[in-house]
Amino acid sequence: MPDYDLIVIGAGPGGYVAAIRGAQLGLSVAVVEQEKALGGTCLRVGCIPSKALLESSEQYEQARTRLAEHGVIVGEVALDLGALLQRKTKTVSILTKGIEGLFKKHGVTRLTGRGVLTAPGTVEVRGERETSSVTASHVLLATGSVPVSLPGVALDGDRIGTSTEALAYPTVPKHLIVIGAGYIGLELGSVWRRLGARVTVVEYLDRILPGTDGELAADALKLFRKQGLEFRLGAKVSGASVEGESCTVTTAGGEPLTGDRVLVAVGRRANTGDLGLETVGITVDERGRIPVDAHFRTNLPGHYAIGDVIPGPLLAHVAEEEGIACVEAIVTGYGHVNYATVPGVCYTHPEVAGVGQTEEQLTAAGTAYRRGVFPFLANGRARSLGETDGKVKILADAATDRLLGVHILGPRAGDLIAEAVVAMEYGATAEDLARSFHAHPTLAETLKEAALAVDGRAIHM
Ligand code: NAI
């Protein structure tokens, strides 16, 4: 008899959620995690700490530049970076401990150490002091991803680092050079600009936020530039070096940039090395990712993979849904993830969020669509908040009116997009959205108005 029904390797959002769902469904479950804190990249050095820093730095910026327009007069505003970083650490600690509590509540066993497959169904747990071996009928690989760098850019874990270092710079950089205008570059670039750094973002493409709707990304670029972020677009970084406290970043054909810190944010890759995959014969693709079928089965029976280790978007909420679907499929024979409604959110100010297809994708596919656009400027709640930048764009099928894509640049776009996700999940039309109640005055009314605009009948425009 194996020791457990299910062993999950990796306690990130994919793994820990899968473990809890497995326990809910009556499986005996163990989770192998090498870090002391549970929660993976997302909780420890990703989504959560970055959101804590985004919130604190935005409060600082508001206090410095925006409170007076509300008639709130404060004295000189000062930054206590130590306290700001401590608050972030505390937020992370509360949430990671929360997962320990959830494991206890659901009877999930936590095994601390590096999990390595030594035979089908057998996982060696290599701890700091001892190594043990456990067996299970099902093994789920959820080991996530790690940052990548570029040729000629050697990460030194200090001056030239990744998001991990950028979440904890001990002082505000004088000039931070960010390589990559994706999610991480823009979020953490925004944090340090607000805290007083000069920030230059160097991006290979001639646009920011690849994959998001082009019009909204261009609008966002204008706003970020107005805020003081500097951009060098169409610039391919060819190297970075450090001498003392000074860093130099070279780009193909451009002037070198000098600063005191470099943040490399050019993507992440599947963390599938040293897992024993070759020992047991689990296949990986040319990028080290584990191919799976619709039920997250690898080529080895009884072995599954989810989240950043499989092809698809590298997002915490995708990993969570995959974890749940995978375990439900193991127990019930059925589990499903709808990849057509995965929302993406960049937590800058304002936020950029989208679900479904972009105008570029629809045009490339030759799909006939109608668009409805509504600006936050014309929304009463946005006016009273003083948050009028941005717009909502709704793309609907020209023949059926079904929602094909919803894209938002604006205040709380990341929360607003949830309505669009639910609508698309249920196959709603723009008309459905337009006829649904939206409390007044709320930011969500912009979605209703954009839906009305698809049919040329927005009221407040
Ligand atoms: P990314 O894939 O979002 O963006 C990387 C950027 O680097 C791209 O714009 C790319 O064109 C650029 N780049 C690549 N090579 C370059 C070169 N030689 N010179 C200049 N620019 C170059 O990757 P990022 O921001 O590192 O994020 C990693 C992953 O983490 C993403 O897949 C993202 O989905 C996820 N993530 C999601 C967040 C969210 O949901 N809010 C927040 C942070 C990360």
Image (tube, rainbow, N blue to C red):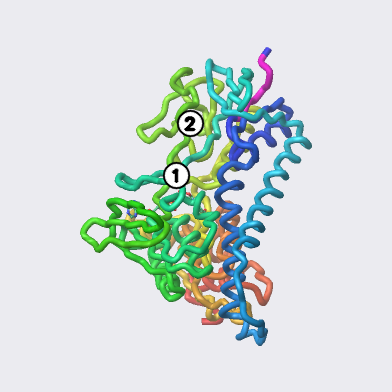
Predominant secondary structure, magenta span: strand
User: Which numbered disc covers residue 387?
Assistant: none
Residue 380, can we see it? no
Q: Is residue 420 visible?
A: yes
In the image, farthest residue toward the front: 244
- Mark 1 CB near ligand 1 (8 Å cut): yes
Could you tell me which residue is drawn at 47 percent across and 46 percent down?
313
Above or below residue 413? Residue 249 is above
**Residue 293 numbered mark, or none:** 2
Disc marking residue 147: 1
**How far from the left and from the top, in percent, is residue 422?**
60, 55
Relative to residue 298, is residue 52 depicted above or below?
A: below
Residue 159: x, y in percent? Answer: 43, 53
The relative height of residue 277 versus residue 246 in the rendered view (above or below) is: above
Task: Give the magenta part as a residue range.
Answer: 2-8
Mark 2: which amino acid? Asp
Q: Amino acid at mark 1?
A: Pro
Q: Is residue 2 above or below residue 141?
A: above
Element class at badge 1: strand
- Which residue is nearer to you in this view: 90 or 97? 90
Q: Position of residue 382 (x, y in %)?
A: 59, 77
Q: Is residue 351 left or right of residue 199?
A: right
**Mark 2 secondary-structure assignment:** loop
- Residue 407 or 18: which is nearer the viewer? 18
Q: Residues within 10 Å of mark 2 (few under 14, many from 20)?
A: few
